Amino acid sequence: MKRGEGKRGQVTIFIIIAVFIVGIVVAIFILRSGVIPQIGGQSEKNPSSFLQSCLEKKIDSTTNLLSSQGGYVSNPLNYTFKFTNEKSSIAISYLCYTAGYYVPCINQEPMLISHLKKEVKDSISEDVKNCFDELTSSLANQGYTVDSTYNGFNIELTNGRLEVPIDGKISLIKSGATSNYDNLNVSFQSKFYDTALVVQEITSQEARFCNFEYLGYMLLYPQWTISKLRTSDSTIIYTVQNKASVDKFNFAIRGCVIRPGP
């Protein structure tokens, strides 16, 4: 073999190795980024990522509203209250209430977590369907043949998370290739559940003991900030906040009230 031919052979081997390495790097990048490669050099985020981006603002605004108003979008059993740092009054729901005197309040939401899940679901129902439709339209505009089924969704509240598992399926066909998606779970970081557990504990103790030792609770669990304000008509306004979250959960209590004198 001539020397020139040997060098050309070595160069060819190096080129093949380099192409192989580049291919591996590209594959790793695709797997880590969750991006599905498309024909023609285009790319589209996976369906769950699309839905998460579409729903994020609505989820944030919904949990913020529910937190500020005692866990309800609208509730006739409320106390209108204006905090000193707020521009307007808030209709804060009573989570424990009695109209009488000298008797403990009655817990209005003993299954608070289930109630909050329903409130969130009712609030975002239309948005979830719209986001699902936007997703399928976006894929169709990219040249896919889209076959989709939407059967609703649920709300799951867990430690540090708010999850929206969507009961839907999407089948994509393009250039003879088919992709199927039937696990459209959307997950958000949220302290909504964690805060609700503290609110539930406060409400339970107020109903049983006419009191909650919030200062002692904060010493035991320093990640929480709890304030307690008593109004002129003996309604108590609690505000609970996890220090890792900007949301504040306000709620009202009226119980064990002493009748005012003559």
Image: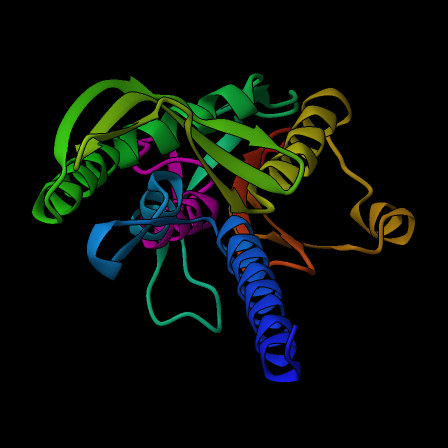
Above or below 24: residue 106: above
Query: What residue do we see at 74% from left, 27% from top?
Result: 205
Q: Tell me where residue 5 appears, x and y as whole percent.
A: 58, 77
Q: Which residues are magenta?
A: 56-80
Quarter of the view holding residue 181: top left
Query: What residue do we see at 74% from left, 20% from top?
Result: 208
Q: Tell me where residue 254 appears, x and y as whole percent.
A: 56, 34
Quadrant of the snapshot with the N terminus: bottom right
Front one among 49 and 116: 49
Front one among 90 and 188: 188
Quadrant of the snapshot with the C terminus: top right
Q: Tell me where residue 12 appears, x and y as whole percent.
A: 56, 70
Above or below 65: residue 130: above
Query: What residue do we see at 48% from left, 73% from top?
Result: 85
Q: Tell me where residue 126 appears, x and y as whole percent.
A: 19, 33
Left or right placement of residue 81 versus residue 40 in this view: right
